Image (spheres, rainbow, N blue to C red):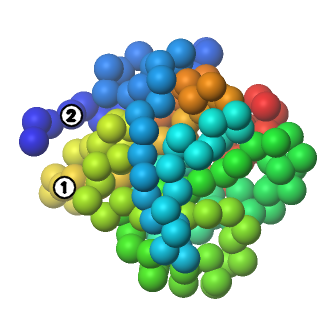
Amino acid sequence: MAARKASTPSTPSGESSDSQFLKVGQKAPAFSLKNAAGRTVKLSDLKGKKVILYFYPKDLTPGCTTEACAFRDDYAEYLAKGVEVFGISADDTALHQKFIDKHSLPFQLLSDPDHSMIEKYGAWVEKSMYGKKYWGVARITYIIDEDGKVSHVFPKVKPDQHSRELLALL
């Protein structure tokens, strides 16, 4: 697996200038993933709906919990705007269910344990902590329009502000 550069800031339109990320206007790659209940969710089943796909590193960790709870608190506003929200990580469906139960998350979390979708969406990146390099999920969000095309890319996300940022844009 070739190394990829870490995420770069987005342009004013929300589009990333880094080639690893999907581009605004690009058709979103198809996916078929299990939700916490074990049911398959496919992008093709969401055609005609606006969709937020937010990638996050790990269930039940501080930043990811902050981000998920912000989406939870704002979820009624997303529904009112006709927007579906999905969180995606490499965690398994059992851990997703624990995360949902602990924090009363009303939206679906999708499991990508082999990170095939995460890679297609440019969210599998080389990270560094305490001088040690490793691969993991970056905090990246895409808005997919009703035709299945990328309308916005957010390669740098602040967990406590991101949900409100998205709502202001919608």
Residue 158 percent location from the top left of the image: 58, 46
Instruction: Describe residue 90's horizontal placement relative to residue 134 as left or right.
Output: right
Contact flag, marks 2 and 1 (Cβ < 8 Å): no
The residue drawn where x is 30% and y is 43% is 119
In the image shown, does 144 or 155 lie closer to the viewer?
Answer: 144
Which quarter shows the N terminus?
top left
Using the rendered image of the protein, determine whether residue 30 is visible from the camera's viewpoint: yes
Using the rendered image of the protein, determine whether residue 56 is visible from the camera's viewpoint: no
Give the amino acid type for the residue marked by disc 2 in the picture.
Arg
Query: Can you name the residue that lies furthest to the front here?
Result: 45
- Name the secondary structure under disc 2: loop
Residue 14 percent location from the top left of the image: 58, 22
Would you place residue 57 above or below residue 54 in this image? below
Instruction: Describe residue 40's horizontal placement relative to residue 159 as left or right.
Output: left
Indicate the quadrant where residue 87 lies: bottom right
The residue drawn where x is 41% and y is 16% is 17
Q: Which residue is mark 1?
A: 134
**CA distance separating discs 2 and 1:** 12 Å
Give the amino acid type for the residue marked by disc 1 in the picture.
Tyr
The residue drawn where x is 66% and y is 51% is 85
The residue drawn where x is 18% and y is 55% is 134
Q: Which residue is mark 2?
A: 4
Crowd around label 2: few <14 · some 14–19 · many ≥20 (10 Å): some
In the image shown, does 49 or 75 lie closer to the viewer?
Answer: 49
Residue 20 percent location from the top left of the image: 31, 27
Label at residue 47: none
Crowd around label 1: few <14 · some 14–19 · many ≥20 (10 Å): few
Would you place residue 96 above or below residue 122 in this image? below
